[in-house]
Image: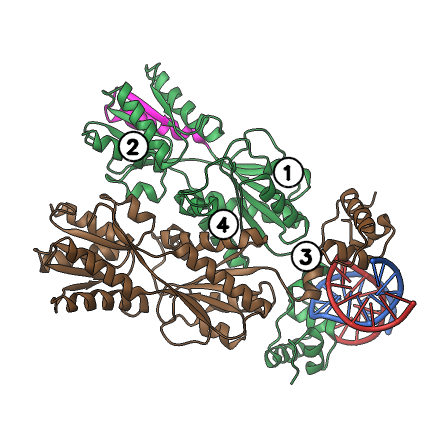
Chain colours: A brown, B green, C red, D blue
DNA sequence: GTGAAAGCGCTAACAA
DNA sequence: TTGTTAGCGCTTTCAC
């Protein structure tokens, strides 16, 4: 019995063949005599051999690992709210994206490395991590508009795929949603149920998702004879949603329908409306966006524009894999369609 | 200009020294002439050198990576609820643990690999992953009592640290909470605010956390002259909490205080109570457990027993690091104390 | 304080 | 179909 972990060499000796043959069996290369193959397999079992990943990576130049990185601004106050990582982990949006990525990766026996970057230093770490070959590529989710990470990765010639179109054009692949169509869906639903004094709590207006949802909403309304709609800008967080709804209500107490640009803010809006004595949906109808877990935990259950995030995340992972394998060389984009989910709030 | 990525060799040539010297500078080994050191550093900058992780791991026998694995039963119905990974990511409990781990790791420039295992096959993958040296050890969070993973890891001589004591003894380190003390805190608070007809929604009674929280609660009550307390068993999920509270209310309509073994179920319980026309805390006081994000999103805000999960998770990561580095060889356990957080529900 | 040289365990040409 | 051999890029004795 040898003390150190068994190596290819040990298995080869045990099976009475060469290292190369064992390697072929392990890696499922065809051209191997079935008889020899089973002899090798037995030797593997007997020795309890497990291929050393570092050694393999060194020669294949593949880490067989991808990074899932969330990149933020780094200008937010730390403290009570918890760390950036903790905040992101608590966000139902991130959960669905991560879940989608993992479900794509798992059947392929791959597991993502989780990275959170909210400063130049941590972003540099992400770049370094990939440059060292610790991961073959990155899936990046940005939390704010001018995130420099995508460009840094592109400049370093590293593989990456983004969730959502970057605010400034960067030559990398991304998946995204037809946000404007989602805004339209919300507008039409509110109109159809008879609302006439509409308003909206928007997302941050410096990111495409925020802009496009608003544009689609306004657009559909304008076509139906509603040229002006009061708006209040939010930041996609619960608190910002509550604040925005409060402002809206103060300035326009008679609104009977509101489109809120994501579910977390919509949940906050419902809370504010309820505390202001408004019944939902009777007095004010509320439509959210995302169909995240917040939509279900909201009372009443939220009517919302569903973003198929798991599918989007899976696609994102698939695109990255294609880039890594060289099956795809040019950046591409895949845009998904939103869908209205009608529940109780509108 | 060379096409391939720069290697130590390239930097050495550029700096006019040997590979060994460059390696020393990169790794911050002392015995290096300051002058040479800066020459090397310049050469590194000029070439844009980044050490290859696989090559380093091959010789150091360290992956400098740890796995964060969530191990579940695999007997739960897939489907509407989403995949195991998605469900865990949506759970505020997991979010805090992961956040704590990440915040410990980040200053050390380490990033966890996220793995979800809910079947024998996926558990075997976790073991294989570690045996290949892809990660130096595992942090494991089990979602059910008889999780075989800890034992499998221990048998394979792999480093691991658990979150919570395993149901059956396994020779591995773990961090845990003094759950019984938490139950006691809840009992005393409820009694102190004048509740006299108490009941409890427990966690699953086949896991230590479920048992101990109940035991502590009962114990404190028994000491104060309340020998019998109605209970309803839940499974730590929202739905199971709602079901348990419904049963409790049907059988004991006059309860005026309830201890619910985690916040997610407590949130569900509040919902059930509210729909049954009970005011919280006036008619029924509710105390939760964990102080997860559910405690804050609950209406009214939940009075709860706080589990310092971030600290626990950080400690878990620290213990693992000590094991990996060989600074600690014997399994150990660290038990944290819970703390009552008084909000509006009790 | 620095360099030469020996591997770490594996894959992939290339030969046989 | 199988074996031989040459590295992949790095750390680490061991001399000097």
Q: Is residue B120 left or right of residue B79?
A: right
The answer for how far apart the CA atoms under marks 2 and 1 are is: 37 Å
Q: Residues within 10 Å of mark 2 (few under 14, many from 20)?
A: many
Mark 4 or 1: the one toward you = 1
Image quadrant of residue A88? Answer: bottom left
Cα–Cα span, label 2 and label 3: 48 Å
Choose mark 3 or mark 4, whichever is in front: 3
Closer to the N terminus: mark 4 or mark 1?
4
Residue at 31% across, 41% down: B295
Label 2 and label 1 in one chain: yes
Q: Which residue is mark 1?
A: B152
Q: Which residue is mark 4?
A: B101
Chain to which mark 4 belongs: B
Quadrant of the rendering where the C terminus of chain B is positioned: top left
Numbered range of the magenta stretch = B178-201
Q: Is residue A66 magenta?
A: no
Residue B269 is tagged as 2
Q: Residue at x 34, y 25 (%)?
A: B200
Residue B150 visible somewhere in the drawing: yes
- Disc 3 crowd rating (10 Å Cα; few below 14, some 14-19, many 20+) is many
Question: Which secondary structure lies at badge 1?
Answer: helix
The chain ID associated with circle 2 is: B
Q: Considering only vertical position in the picture, is C7 above or below A298?
A: below
Left or right: B99 in relation to A259:
right
């Amino acid at each position: 019995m040898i003390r150190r972990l068994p190596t290819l060499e040990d298995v080869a000796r045990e099976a009475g063949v060469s290292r190369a043959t064992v390697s072929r069996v392990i890696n499922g290369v065809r051209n191997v005599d079935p008889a020899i193959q089973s002899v090798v397999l037995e030797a593997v079992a007997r020795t309890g051999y497990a291929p050393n990943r570092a050694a393999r990576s060194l020669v294949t130049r593949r880490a067989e690992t991808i990074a899932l990185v969330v990149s933020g601004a780094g200008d937010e106050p730390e403290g009570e709210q918890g760390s950036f990582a903790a905040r992101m982990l608590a966000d139902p949006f991130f959960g669905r994206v991560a879940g989608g990525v993992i479900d794509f990766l798992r059947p392929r026996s791959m597991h993502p490395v989780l990275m959170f970057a909210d400063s130049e230093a941590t972003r540099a770490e992400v770049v370094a991590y990939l440059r060292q070959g610790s991961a073959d590529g990155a899936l990046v989710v940005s939390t704010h508009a001018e995130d420099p990470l995508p460009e840094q990765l592109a400049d370093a010639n590293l593989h990456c795929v983004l969730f959502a179109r970057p605010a400034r054009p960067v030559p990398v692949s991304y998946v995204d949603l037809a946000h404007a169509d989602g805004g339209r869906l919300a507008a039409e639903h509110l109109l159809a149920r008879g609302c006439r004094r509409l308003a909206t709590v928007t997302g941050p207006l410096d990111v495409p998702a925020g802009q496009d949802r608003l544009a689609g909403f306004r657009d559909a309304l304008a076509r139906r004879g509603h040229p002006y709609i009061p708006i209040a800008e939010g930041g996609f967080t619960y608190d910002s949603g509550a604040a925005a709804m409060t402002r809206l209500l103060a300035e326009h107490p008679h609104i009977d329908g509101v489109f809120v640009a994501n579910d977390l803010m919509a949940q906050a809006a419902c809370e504010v409306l309820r505390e202001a004595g408004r019944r939902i949906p009777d007095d004010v109808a509320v439509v959210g966006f995302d169909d995240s877990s917040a939509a279900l935990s909201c009372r009443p259950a939220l009517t919302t524009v569903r973003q198929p995030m798991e599918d989007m995340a899976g696609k994102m992972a698939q695109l990255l894999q294609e880039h890594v394998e060289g099956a795809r060389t040019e950046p591409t984009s895949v845009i998904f369609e939103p869908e209205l989910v009608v529940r109780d709030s509108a």
